[in-house]
Amino acid sequence: MKRITSLLFAVFMLSAFTIKGDPEKDILGKWKVDDASVGSAKKAMIERVRKINAEQAEQMAGFEGLDDIIKGLVYEYKADGTLDVSAPQGSQSMKWAISADHKYLSRTREDGTSSKDSIISIKPERLIFADEGTKEKIEFVKAQ
């Protein structure tokens, strides 16, 4: 009995460390910011704008409809390495890539500006990143 228990434990430990998802495939599809992460996403967005234009960032911070805009954003990661971010006001396309060590997600806009967020988790049903500037944890769920 002791030997069977040891064998089962060994199999479990091996499978726990060898079964991993494929982040490049798991990220594909349409995503939205989880409602619980809207505040973190808002803070990260305002701080990114602040680096470019402090006055515009202050206007964003005071805009009451920003939460609703963030809730309405849909991020579509495609297998060809493109990312479309759609909002009622329009859409934006960019390139995305996951680092070889699966620790970072880079996004590069058409104007050449880029961001590099830390990957906390990429699963088929949930994405979790830490914003590069604020270190805010932002969770995404599949968009309907």
Image (tube, rainbow, N blue to C red):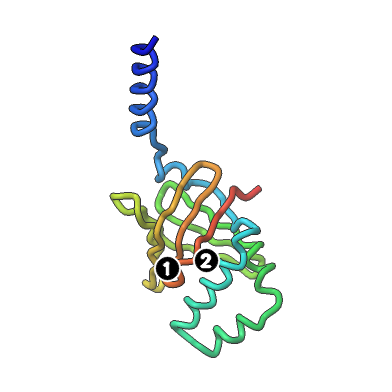
Q: Are dots 1 and 2 in contact, CB under 8 Å?
A: yes
Is residue 18 found left or right of 78 in the rendered image? left
Between the C-alphas of marks 1 and 2, the distance is: 8 Å
Is residue 88 found left or right of 115 in the rendered image? right
Image quarter for residue 37?
Answer: bottom right
- Residue 93: x and y, percent? 48, 63
Image quarter for residue 15?
Answer: top left
Q: Residue at x 43, y 46 (%)?
A: 79
Query: Which numbered tag is attached to residue 40?
Result: none
Is residue 17 found left or right of 41 in the rendered image? left
Residue farthest bottom in this picture: 55
> Which of the pair 47/79 is nearer the observer?
47
Mark 2 = which residue?
Answer: 92
36 is higher (above) or lower (below) than 8: below
Element under label 2? strand
Q: Residue at x 37, y 13 (%)?
A: 2
Residue farthest top in this picture: 1
**Quarter the N terminus occupies:** top left
**Residue type highlighted by circle 1:** Arg
Mark 1 = which residue?
Answer: 109
